[in-house]
Amino acid sequence: MLSKVEELKLISQIVLSDDRRAFARLVDAYQPILHNFFLNLTAGDEALCDDLAQETFIKAYANIRQFRGLSKFKTWLFRIAYNEFYTYARRTKEVLTEEPIEPPDMLTRDEEGNDARMDVFTAMQYLSTDERTVISLFFINDMPMKKIAEITGMPEGTIKSHISRGKAKMAKLLDPH
C-alpha cells in the first residue's frame, strides 16, 4: 500500500507530465483491493468485476486533475468505484431495493464443509445492494465508518443499520444449525 506522500507524488507526476507509468503504479497498488470490492458487490462475477474495475481506473485517469488530496487517493478511487457500480446497476435495471430476493433458510455446504468462501459470496447475493456495499467496505476492506460515509454519501447511522441488518441476514444464512 502506498503512503499519502507517495500517492501525491505519483498524482503530481500524472497531472504535470501525463506520466502513465506513475498511473500504472497506482493501478498496481489499488487493483487487488478494488477487484475484491467489486467481487463482493457482484457476488463473485469475475468478468463483471474486471469490467467495473477497468471503467473505474479509466474514469480515475480521466479525472485525476480533479483530485484535491483532501482525502486519500484510495477513498477517492472507491467513490468512483461505488458510483460506477451503481451506474451499472441502474443501466441493467438491477433492483436496488432494501429487500432482495428471498433467501433460503440456510445455504447448503459441500460434504467436507470447506467451501466457506463460496458460501459468503452466495450469502452476499441475498443482501440488499447497500448492505453488500457497506459490509464489503467495512469488513473486507477494513474501512472506518467515516470513510464509508465519504464513499457512499450515506449518514453513519444508516451505515451502521445496513451493517447490522446485513450481519444478521448472513448469520442466519450461514448458520449450520
Image: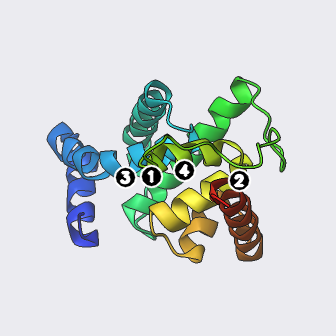
Horizontal relation, residue 47 to residue 4: left or right: right
Mark 4 highlights which residue?
120
Tag nearer the camera, 2 or 1: 2
User: Mark on residue 130?
Assistant: 2
- Residue 38 in view in this figure: no
Quadrant of the snapshot with the C terminus: bottom right
The answer to whether marks 3 and 1 mark residues whose Cβ atoms lie closer than 8 Å is no
Q: Nearer the viewer, residue 163 or 86?
A: 163
Q: Amino acid at mark 2?
A: Asp
In this rendering, is residue 49 above or below 135? above
> Mark 2 and mark 3: span between their CA atoms?
19 Å
Tag nearer the camera, 4 or 2: 4
Q: Nearer the viewer, residue 106 or 23?
A: 106
Total count of labels: 4
Q: Secondary structure at mark 3?
A: helix
- Residue drawn at x 77%, y 43% is 103
Q: Amino acid at mark 3?
A: Ile
Mark 3 highlights which residue?
33
Mark 1 highlights which residue?
77
Q: Amino acid at mark 1?
A: Leu
Give the percent coordinates (x, y) of residue 161. 77, 70
Q: Amino acid at mark 4?
A: Val
